[in-house]
Image (cartoon, grey):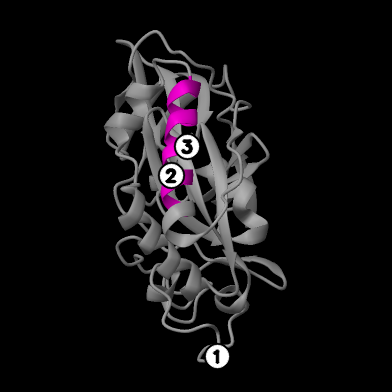
Amino acid sequence: MLCDDALLVIGLRWDGFSPHLMAYDRLKGVIVQIDISPGARLDWRVGSEKRCTGRFGENGYEPCKSGLPPRSGFSACQNCSSFPLQECAFNPRCDGELCDHPACGGMHDVYLAFYGDMVKVGMTRSERLPTRVVEQGADAYCRVATYGSRRLARNAELCIASLTGAAERIPSKYFLSSLANLPNRNAIAANHGRCEGLIGDMLGIDISAPKLLDGYPLRQPLWQIPALKATCGAYSGESLGAKGPYLVYRGYFGLDAVRLSDLAGRTVLV
């Protein structure tokens, strides 16, 4: 679906606990927001093909000139990417001395995020930590340590994952099933204490206390586990709100969910 009046989704942005699904109106040449707030009516048709989402430069948003599909795992092509070498987004090769990119040499935090009775480890730029854990839909989080480069933080992330058994990704099925329950504060406290002991004993690091994240527009517990729908295709229903990368809506036969982060680069008719 590449008709002229379709919107190109360019990303999901969170301001605190307020999600904004942003899209580019190619006919008008402006960025618009697709309403996903609780109570909003969804009547979408989502295309199966992906295109580069473009970039934000000194003059604001710049659509991709090539319009080529991005590589798997990315929403932008290499020319529009914020990293000189896209692989460095996940596995940095230097501390910024090879590329002189500020994201590589800047301060990064390693953190633990808690989901039900699961723990995830991650790393992000220090100033983005509160936003990053909301983007990922965590029930709570704590900062483990701060490092002077992205490469050092990634190495520490791998070490802590091995030491604590923390996951690097939370499966969709588990995430959606957890929405039928209130966040498990006892599990959060128990997992934080276990990780705190391991990281303190083995690495000599005192991790911060867990901070609960309870301001999402999607309220728990849901009365049933939402069914994850294929990203492309037609959607119709009433939005119940978003948590992290997922939007839950009331469909014809119960609760359904769509992964908002997978909409980036796709065209949507609304």
Query: Mark 1 packing: few (<14 Cα in 10 Å), some, or many (20+)?
Result: few
Does the segment drawn in magenta span residue 191? yes
- Most extreme residue toward the bottom is 98
* Residue located beneath label 2 in the image: 195
Is residue 184 visible in this depiction of the protein?
no
Residue at the spot 63% in from the left edge and 55% down from the top edge: 128
Which numbered marker is on residue 193?
Answer: 3
Q: Earlier in the sequence, mark 2 or mark 1?
A: 1
Residue name at image x 50 percent, y 23 percent:
185
Is 188 located above or below residue 165 in the figure? Answer: above
Judge from the rendering whether residue 72 lies leftward or rightward of residue 53; answer left or right.
left
Q: Which amino acid does the dot numbered 3 rest on?
A: Gly
In contact (CB < 8 Å): disc 2 and disc 3: yes
Q: Quadrant of residue 104?
A: bottom right
Which of 155/205 is in front?
Answer: 205
Mark 2: secondary structure: helix
SS for callout 1: loop
Provide the residue designation for mark 1. Answer: 97
